[in-house]
């Protein structure tokens, strides 16, 4: 019988950190888009009637969608520079931490990222919700390091 010390619990989804090259560490409340999907092509081979051959094609990586209370001005400036024609690709990583926040349990690295979309907070004088901005990054692929 295995002891409880050998137990492998699932990783927690609420302790994570987002890093972008030379920019300050992002304190985001949500991170979505950690996904890879590979296209497959069907090829009905002559004489093979019990199945269709399937061949892999290109892989697609959706945009990373980051949400936080207020997006850092340096991220805004990066997007504003892009609108002015100054293209600066950045690499980054999403680190998933253990329950104590000290050890990295998973590390996803992304490459060639550009700011694609910024969405401002929904403002309402009649409510008491936190103002949340969304920052979306297009990138050239994910690698899982841990």
Image (cartoon, grey):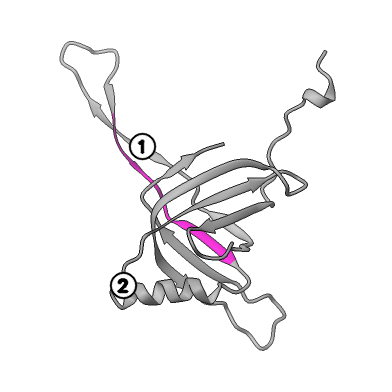
Q: On the rendered image, what quadrant is the N terminus found in?
A: top right
Q: Secondary structure beneath disc 2?
A: loop
Q: Would you say 31 lies left or right of 42 here? A: right
Q: Residue at the spot x=57%, y=78% of the render?
A: 122
Q: Residues within 10 Å of mark 1 (few under 14, many from 20)?
A: few
Q: On the rendered image, what quadrant is the C terminus found in?
A: top right
Q: Secondary structure beneath disc 1?
A: strand
Q: Is residue 65 magenta?
A: yes
Res. 56 visible in picture? yes
Please determine whether, in this image, residue 22 is positioned above or below residue 4: below
Q: Would you say 34 lies left or right of 140 here? A: right
| Main secondary-structure element of the magenta-colored stretch | strand
Q: For the residues marked 1 and 2, what is the alpha-carbon distance in whole angstroms?
A: 31 Å
Residue that carries the numbered disc 2 in the rendered image: 86
Q: Residues within 10 Å of mark 2 (few under 14, many from 20)?
A: few
The residue most toward the left is 46
Q: Position of residue 139 (x, y in %)?
A: 38, 54
Which stretch is magenta?
56-67
**Of residues 20 and 137, the one drawn nearer to the viewer in this rendering:** 20
Please determine whether, in this image, residue 106 is positioned above or below residue 63: above
Q: Position of residue 99 (x, y in %)?
A: 76, 45
**Of residues 58 and 98, the one drawn nearer to the viewer in this rendering:** 98
Looking at the rendered image, the disc whose residue lies closer to the viewer, 1 or 2, is: 2
Residue that carries the numbered disc 1 in the rendered image: 38
Q: Position of residue 79 (x, y in %)?
A: 41, 72
Displayed quadrant of residue 88: bottom left
């Amino acid at each position: 019988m295995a002891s409880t010390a050998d137990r492998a619990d699932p990783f927690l989804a609420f302790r994570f950190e987002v890093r972008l090259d030379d920019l300050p560490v992002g304190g985001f409340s949500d991170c979505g888009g950690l996904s890879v999907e590979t296209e497959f092509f069907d090829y009905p081979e002559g004489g093979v009637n019990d199945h269709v051959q399937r061949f892999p094609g290109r892989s697609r990586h959706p945009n990373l969608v980051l949400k936080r209370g207020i997006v850092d001005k340096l991220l805004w400036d990066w997007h504003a520079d892009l609108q002015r024609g100054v293209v600066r690709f950045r690499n980054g990583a999403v680190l998933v931490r253990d329950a104590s926040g000290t050890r990295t349990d998973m590390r996803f690295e992304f490459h060639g990222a550009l700011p694609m979309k910024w969405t401002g907070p929904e403002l309402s004088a009649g409510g008491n919700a936190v103002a949340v901005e969304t920052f979306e990054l297009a990138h050239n692929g994910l690698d899982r390091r841990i």
